[in-house]
Image: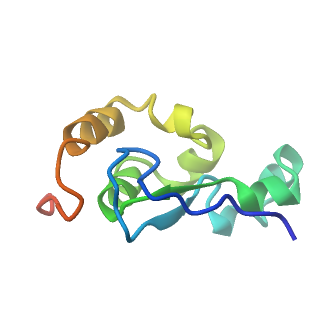
Amino acid sequence: MPKLPPKPDHCELCQRPVPDLTRHHLIPRHLHRKKRFQKAFDRDDLIARTLWVCRPCHNAIHRICSERELGLYYNTRDKLLELEELRTFVDWLKDKPAGFIPKKRR
């Protein structure tokens, strides 16, 4: 069984100390069975490639990109932060208190 990264005490995107972090699969789980992803990544990499993020950052990731785009192009922390919209959101969020939850976008 692959070893998952340990849960840190802060969000790996905005760096805020948030107690309730969620695990973001950099290669979405439903893509693990697709042949394209099985050829490009080994099984351990598919499972272990994750980030621990706060709920607002997690929501922003999935609002900005489809799961297919995430798996193909934005499957590392650095590649995610190349997305200008996400980087702008993270820069805005990082100075907010740990319990801060942004209003939902319409």
Q: Which residue is drawn at 79% across and 67% down?
A: 33
Q: Residue at x 41, y 56 (%)?
A: 62
| Quadrant hosting residue 87 | top left
Q: Which residue is drawn at 67% across and 58% down?
A: 5
- Depth order, front residue of 7/65: 7
**What x and y, as percent, mark residue 43?**
86, 60
The type of colouring in the image is: rainbow
Does residue 86 sit above or below 63 in this rendering? above
In the picture, the quarter occupied by the C terminus is bottom left
In the picture, the quarter occupied by the N terminus is bottom right
Does residue 64 sit above or below 17 in this rendering? above
| Quadrant hosting residue 38 | bottom right
- Depth order, front residue of 83/95: 95
- Depth order, front residue of 76/94: 94
**What x and y, as percent, mark residue 41?**
83, 48
Does residue 51 sit above or below 1 in this rendering? above
**What x and y, as percent, mark residue 84?**
34, 29
40 horizontally vs 72: left or right: right
12 horizontally vs 56: left or right: right
Q: Total of numbered circles in the picture?
A: 0
